[in-house]
Each structure stands twice: as structure tokens, then as C-alpha cells.
């Protein structure tokens, strides 16, 4: 992708400035922060002083920038930029200072030389923070300065190859500038609300730092409150999960105990018939079995059937198909039992004959 012409010029200027003395520029005194008055004669107004690299690093060392990335998800955001109560103090303070300096509302711009110095100082701070505050750059890019390109604090290197008279190739990496760390055009130069333009301006503006620190104090306090609430919620969910697990374990153990008791005892005739008609085994299974709770009345825990109320005249045993799976159905038209086990139909018929002989059901004319 071709780099825009204004970026090329800007990066070339940065390269020249860096070659001259990047360290001295980053640590220079507090020069005036000049803002154009947007007049024909291009007059400038001084609204304060440029922050040094140390000044900027002090602000970026605030606790609000030291949370894990996941923690910021608890905060409200506007287009990925974090917002909280009191954050409007930022643009209100900037607007008041601009009004006092006679700067009309409009697209934000900073005097070019001041902007280049601010750029170098912010980049210098980010380079140091990469060592003593890892993760800061990603935090800024994701939640505070959305305009930041990848690694704007590192120089872009161009590889130049050469060959000697013996044909040996060599490479030389030549710095060609940086991507800008400040981009007031990202938000269209608007600073009438909290955004990366407003924050960038206040970072390079020494007198804005007390306001920024107070804003960050509010945000950090809110985030601490949310983290405490989140931790408590997670602890409660953990306790509930452990309780659910304990109850599930108890239910499993109780089910196993009941199954062991059921398996160990002799089954009644009706229990065997109903088990055979549903699971294909006279002893039933752990997940499905029938128990005779009263004479001629059985239950599987979900439904209760009194054999004496079944219509023996209408009672039929017949095969049914669900897709390619064969089922054997026992039904009198109201009660229906199904097994998918491949059991002999004549054995099932004999079982029901014994059941109705023990507990005769009702009869009808047809």
C-alpha cells in the first residue's frame, strides 16, 4: 500500500529530527504549546507548555493503565474508547483554555515544530515503557488511543543490499523514520468529547496533566469497584458450581445405591414384564426400570400404570419402525410401551399373558 504523501513528509521530518538528537529533544525543557488561531496571517496562540517525555511517562504510569486487558471489558465504552462519569472534564477543560486564549472552535491543529517535538517525546516515553511497563502499548491502542499504529515508537528500517568485488552480499538496515504516534486527523480533529484526539492533546500539554490524573483517578476507582464486584460474582458462581457438583454427585451416588438394591432383589412378575417391554431385560437397567408400588400397579418414576385398568381386548403387540430402527410396541391404545431391543415377539406375548393372568384388565366388545 502506498503511504500518503503527508505521512512521507512527516516521517522524513521525524527521521531528520531523530538523527539530530532524539534524546535531547525528548528531554528538552517546557517549550510553548502553540495552536494556530486560524487567521489569514497564521498567528499562533500559546495555551501552555509542551510536556517532556518524563512528564508524559508519569501520566502513563497511572494505575489505570496497569490492569490486565480483560479487566477493561467491565467498563463502558464508546467506539472501543473507555468512558466513565467525570470524563467530560477533559474536553470541557480544553474548550475553556482555548476560549481564554482566543482560539475559535474548529479542527484541532498544533504548530508543526511543536508537534514534531511532542511526537518525539511521546515515542521516547513509549520506548521506555515497553521495558518497565510491558503491555501498556496494547492497552493504549485498544482502549485509549485507538489511532495508534503498530509500534509507532520504533523506527521503520529499510534494508539496503550491496555487493563487493568478490560478489559477497551484505545488508544494511537504515532507519527511514516512524509512523506518527499522534494523529489529530483520526477523529477529524474534533476535541469536543473524550476521544483519542483529546487525550493525545492533553498528554503533550503539561498544564493538562493534573486534570488528566484526576480523570484517571475516577476511572481507576470505578474499575477497582467493578473488579471487586466481578471477583465476588465469580466467587459466588464458584460456590454455586461446587454446590451443584456436590448435589449432582450425591444424586449419582443415591441413584447407584438404589440401582444396586434393585438389582440385588428378586423382581415381581409385573416388574419383569414391564422391564422386558421397555428395555428388553427382565431386570431393567440403571436408567430405566419398573417398580411395583402397589398390587398390580407399577411405576418407572415418571408414570404410574395400573394393569387392571388396561384394556385387554384392545391390547396389541406389533412392530414399528423409526427410520431404519425396528421397535416393538405394547399398547392398548392409551398406554404405550416401546423397546428397541431385538427381543422375540412371542416371548413378549407370553409375558403379557402372564401379567394379565395375574392382574386381569378390563374388557370391551371389540
Image (spheres, grey):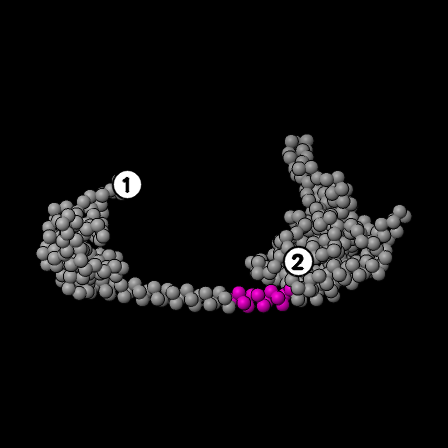
Residue 229: give x, y in percent of width and height: 54, 67
Q: Does the magenta stretch include residue 226?
A: yes
Q: Residue 323 carries which label?
A: 1
On the image, the x and y values in percent for residue 204 come to 75, 57
Which sits in the foreground, 70 or 40? 40
In the image, what residue occupies the spot 40% across and 66% down?
Answer: 242
- Residue 115 shown left or right of residue 129 in the figure: right
Over which residues does the magenta segment extend?
219-231
Tell me the quadrant of the picture where the N terminus can be found.
top right
Q: Position of residue 322 (x, y in %)?
A: 27, 43
What residue is drawn where x is 76% and y is 47%? 14
Give me the C-alpha separation between circle 2 and circle 1.
Answer: 67 Å
Front in this rendered view, residue 31 or 141: 141
Which of the pair 315/136 is nearer the observer?
A: 315
| Closer-to-camera residue (274/101) | 274
Relative placement, left or right, of 361 versus 92 is left
Q: Which of marks 2 and 1 is nearer the N terminus?
A: 2
Query: Which residue is painted at 88% across and 51% down in the image?
Result: 43
Residue 142: x and y, percent?
62, 53
**Residue 58 visible in rendering:** no
Left or right of 357 on screen, residue 174? right
Density class for disc 1 (Cα within 10 Å; few <14, some 14-19, many ≥20) is: few
- Whether residue 227 is in magenta: the answer is yes
Residue 59 in the image: above or below residue 321: below
> According to the image, label 2 marks what residue?
129
The overriding secondary structure of the stretch rendered in magenta is: helix
Relative vertical location of residue 317 with respect to residue 244 in this rendering, above or below: above
The residue at 65%/31% (across/down) is 166
Q: Is mark 2 on a helix, strand or loop?
A: helix
Amino acid at each position: 500500500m502506498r503511504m500518503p504523501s503527508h505521512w512521507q513528509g512527516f516521517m522524513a521530518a521525524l527521521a531528520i529530527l531523530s538523527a539530530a538528537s532524539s534524546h535531547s529533544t525528548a528531554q528538552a525543557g517546557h517549550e510553548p504549546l502553540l495552536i494556530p488561531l486560524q487567521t489569514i496571517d497564521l498567528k499562533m496562540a500559546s495555551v501552555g507548555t509542551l510536556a517532556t517525555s518524563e512528564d508524559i511517562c508519569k501520566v502513563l504510569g497511572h494505575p489505570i493503565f496497569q490492569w490486565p486487558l480483560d479487566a477493561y471489558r467491565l467498563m463502558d465504552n464508546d467506539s472501543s474508547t473507555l468512558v466513565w462519569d467525570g470524563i467530560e472534564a477533559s474536553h470541557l477543560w480544553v474548550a475553556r483554555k482555548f476560549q481564554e486564549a482566543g482560539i475559535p472552535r474548529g479542527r484541532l491543529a498544533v504548530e508543526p515544530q511543536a508537534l514534531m517535538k511532542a511526537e518525539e517525546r511521546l515515542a521516547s516515553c513509549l520506548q521506555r515503557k515497553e521495558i518497565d511497563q510491558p503491555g501498556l502499548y496494547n492497552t493504549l491502542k485498544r482502549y485509549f488511543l485507538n489511532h495508534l499504529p503498530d509500534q509507532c515508537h520504533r523506527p521503520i528500517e529499510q534494508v539496503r543490499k550491496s555487493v563487493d568485488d568478490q560478489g559477497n552480499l551484505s545488508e544494511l538496515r537504515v532507519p527511514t523514520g516512524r509512523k506518527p504516534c499522534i494523529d489529530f486527523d483520526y477523529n477529524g480533529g474534533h476535541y469536543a468529547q473524550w476521544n483519542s484526539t483529546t487525550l493525545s492533546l492533553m498528554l503533550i500539554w503539561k498544564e493538562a496533566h493534573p486534570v488528566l490524573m484526576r480523570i484517571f483517578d475516577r476511572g481507576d476507582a470505578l474499575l477497582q469497584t467493578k473488579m471487586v464486584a466481578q471477583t465476588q460474582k465469580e466467587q459466588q458462581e464458584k460456590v454455586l458450581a461446587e454446590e451443584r457438583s456436590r448435589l449432582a454427585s450425591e444424586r449419582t451416588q443415591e441413584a447407584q445405591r438404589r440401582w444396586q438394591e434393585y438389582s440385588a432383589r428378586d423382581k415381581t412378575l409385573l416388574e419383569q414384564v414391564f422391564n422386558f417391554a421397555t428395555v428388553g431385560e427382565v431386570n431393567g437397567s440403571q436408567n430405566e426400570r419398573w417398580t411395583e408400588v402397589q398390587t398390580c400397579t407399577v411405576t418407572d418414576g415418571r408414570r404410574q400404570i395400573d394393569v387392571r385398568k388396561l384394556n385387554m381386548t384392545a391390547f396389541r403387540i406389533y412392530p414399528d419402525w423409526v427410520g431404519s430402527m425396528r421397535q416393538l410396541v405394547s399398547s392398548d391404545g392409551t398406554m404405550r410401551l416401546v423397546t428397541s431391543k431385538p427381543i422375540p415377539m412371542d416371548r413378549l406375548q407370553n409375558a403379557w399373558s402372564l401379567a394379565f393372568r395375574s392382574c386381569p384388565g378390563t374388557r370391551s366388545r371389540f
